[in-house]
Image: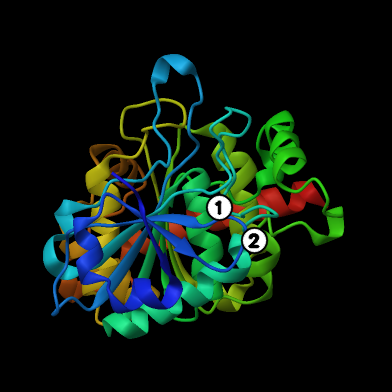
Amino acid sequence: MAVKKVTEAEFCESFEKLKDEEHVLVDFGAEQPLAVKVHPLGNEDSKALVVLFHGAISRKPENNITLPAFLNGRKELGDSAFQISISDPSIREDNSVGIGWFAGNEQLPLQEVLPGFISELSKQLNVDRIIFHGSSAGGFAALYYSWCLKGSIACVSVPQTSAYEYRRPTLNKYLEVCWPNTAEKDYPCLDVKALYGDRVSNFVSYIQSSRDEHHVKNHMIPFLASISPENQDKVALKVSYWGKEGHSGTVPAEERDAWMKAAISAESVTGSDVINSYQKSGTEITPLSQAMMRAAGIKKDSESKKASGRTQQERYQDLNWAETVAKHQKEGL
């Protein structure tokens, strides 16, 4: 079956009809189209658009991976949101590239065209909230594209915040294959810290496994340290241990879904509203964090016993991570 190819305008105008397609190719007028999957979810009453980015793709022959690859739609969100998945255009059939951070390539400079495409689609769908979601390399993409669109939300899980902190040979291969004729000064954004250090006009739900040491040390802490004090309320940080060591698969799907649901249902896109919406979901709290709180003499507050709009638990976690970030900044001096 031939894959349908459409223009940006045609995609936005015929969105509902595209739910019957396995995926479509969106033509931006560049040398390479973008593979996009429209999930058969959401309806005319949906008020949010969820954009999903997958992580790195293993190119080992035994894994029998079919390209283009897409992150599965989140059925747990029900009809609350329209959902689309983007396939990284830089991951190649010849196995030369398995990760591209959705930064694009010379045939499709994705960072130049995707923000406008998502913005126009949201207008066509008449949604009032855009949510970007991804883990690992997909988390990097969610952070980048959310930053580009004011008022949007990035729900990220164990994200990379700098491609330069990934395996250097892998990054070099991506640059060599995808940007061979581009000067280093003209590379796409491969580190979001400078962006978020400049301004934060979106909101970030950042979920991190505490036993993913590389991403805690090299991605999470430097990212948090880059954000100025006046913007710290625009990032909700959830760090825990869910029983699995390492990086891949360390955050349960229900945890990620809970934050997306919170982002969709919150009264407004503010830290307090999204966090409160998340807490009402009942996903909090893990037994480990309860034990930590008991050891520190902290009791879980009821909704009616908040002080200055924040619970004791939130203030305790804020202090804990503030000390961690401060230590990182001091060591970097």
Question: Which residue lies under the disc numbered 2?
Answer: 109
Between 153 and 207, the one lying in front of the other is: 153
Q: On residue 133, which mark appears? A: none
| Residue at image coords 13%, 66% | 79
Residue 325 position, x and y percent, is 62, 53
Tell me the quarter of the image containing the N terminus. Answer: top left
Q: Mark 1 packing: few (<14 Cα in 10 Å), some, or many (20+)? A: many
Between 254 and 92, the one lying in front of the other is: 92
Q: Residue furthest top?
A: 62
Left or right of 292 in this view: 281: left
Residue 308 visible here: no
| Residue at image coords 64%, 61% | 109
Residue 211 visible here: yes
Q: Is 148 situated above or below 35? A: below
Amino acid type indicated by mark 2? Pro
Amino acid type indicated by mark 1? Phe
Residue 272 position, x and y percent, is 34, 75
Question: Which residue lies under the disc numbered 1?
Answer: 102
Task: Kindly state the secondary structure of the residue where label 1 is placed.
Answer: loop
